[in-house]
């Protein structure tokens, strides 16, 4: 079995959705997704051929980081909710999609869960897949980082950038890691490895990030675009400039980057937020770049969602990125 299958705590579950017929013209996600095995992936391919890579979904069911960060817990149920929202969507993708199951964090065992997920992600990347991780709180990001940092892409010298769509820097300097610390953890891990973290954020909310966080961002050379400045043209130019600096990209989407009216089901709903069309355009831009190495979606909290609205948005963005 591949490493991702060994480290998943919960095997893939059956997908469900509307049935319109068995033919290709009627196919929906629930009919297209198959359990992950080593066979469909074949040999590892370079990041530049990302459009041809099969996608593999991996859930990361965790509330531990949000709980430590004193947020609203419930994100552990997000992987199932996003799959349920993806299932009925019409399937227009030109790539295979597989499901590797879930890595789950029990109680406060966050670091162990992140390590298991990291091993799973490394295995998927090295098998030639495009991992699609469904969080979980934004502690999901450090699990993703562990997987990317351990992969052949980094071992072979590719310069990997981290683009975060988020209202928050998540650069908190705390004694215990949480959903608010992952990017400072990444910066320190990269420095220990003799590398520099290339990190950029679209959607920063100035009132929701302290002066200390802005200072940390400046010290680390973090590029960012404030939510109030996120016009379509500004976001496109910002992302293009960042993509030009890297060989491959890890994209992480914290759903609280969106307005609360669009994404109510998060730990920290946004009073302002970045319009969905802007975020969707960024996703299309990243997908078209050919540099997408890995992606995750975090902070969906089904307990506070309204009519599945946030889960549906998450599913729509994933569908956009994989097209």
Image: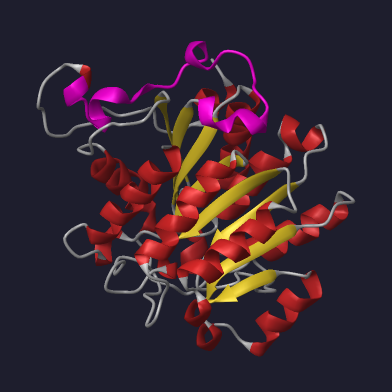
The x and y percentages for residue 13 are: 30, 29
The residue drawn where x is 41% and y is 37% is 323
The residue drawn where x is 63% and y is 61% is 182
**Any magenta on residue 38?**
yes
Nearest the eye: 232 or 44? 232
The x and y percentages for residue 202 are: 55, 67
**Any magenta on residue 190?**
no
Can residue 137 be seen?
A: no
The x and y percentages for residue 178 are: 57, 64
Nearest the eye: 129 or 114? 129
Relative to 173, 135 lies left or right = left
Residue at the limit of the structure toward the front, as seen here: 233
Identify the magenta region.
Answer: 25-53
The x and y percentages for residue 42 are: 57, 13
The residue drawn where x is 36% and y is 59% is 300
Residue at the limit of the structure toward the left, as seen here: 20
Quadrant of the image containing the N terminus: top right
The residue drawn where x is 73% and y is 49% is 246
Nearest the eye: 135 or 64? 135
Q: Residue 264, relative to residue 246: is it above or below?
A: below
Q: Residue 303, relative to residue 145: is it above or below?
A: below
Residue at the limit of the structure toward the right, as seen here: 194
Rendering quarter of residue 63? bottom left
């Amino acid at each position: 079995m591949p490493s991702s299958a060994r480290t998943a705590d919960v095997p893939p579950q059956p997908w469900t959705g509307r049935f319109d017929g068995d033919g290709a013209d009627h196919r929906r996600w629930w009919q297209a997704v198959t359990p992950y095995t080593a066979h469909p992936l074949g040999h590892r391919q370079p990041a530049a051929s990302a459009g041809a890579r099969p996608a593999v979904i991996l859930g990361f069911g965790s509330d531990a980081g949000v709980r430590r960060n004193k947020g609203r817990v419930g994100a552990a149920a997000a992987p199932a909710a996003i799959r349920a929202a993806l299932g009925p969507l019409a399937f227009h993708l030109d790539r295979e999609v597989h499901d590797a199951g879930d890595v789950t964090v029990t109680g406060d065992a966050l670091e162990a869960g992140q390590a298991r997920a990291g091993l799973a992600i490394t295995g998927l990347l090295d098998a030639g897949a495009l991992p699609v991780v469904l969080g979980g709180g934004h502690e999901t990001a450090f699990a993703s980082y562990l997987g990317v940092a351990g992969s052949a892409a980094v071992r072979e010298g590719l310069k990997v950038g981290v683009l975060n769509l988020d209202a928050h820097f998540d650069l908190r300097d705390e004694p215990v890691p949480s959903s608010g610390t992952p990017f400072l953890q990444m910066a320190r891990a990269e420095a220990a490895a003799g590398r520099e973290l290339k990190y950029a954020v679209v959607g920063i909310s100035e009132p929701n990030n302290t002066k200390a966080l802005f200072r940390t961002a400046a010290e680390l050379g973090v590029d960012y675009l404030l939510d109030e400045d996120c016009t379509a043209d500004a976001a496109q130019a910002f992302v293009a400039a960042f993509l030009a600096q890297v060989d491959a990209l890890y994209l992480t989407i914290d759903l609280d980057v969106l307005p609360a009216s669009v994404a109510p089901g998060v730990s920290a709903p946004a009073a302002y937020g970045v319009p969905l069309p802007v975020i969707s355009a960024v996703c299309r831009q990243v997908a078209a770049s050919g540099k997408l190495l890995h992606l995750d979606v975090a902070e969906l909290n089904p307990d506070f969602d309204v009519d599945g609205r946030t889960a549906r948005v998450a599913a729509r963005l994933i569908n956009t990125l994989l097209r």
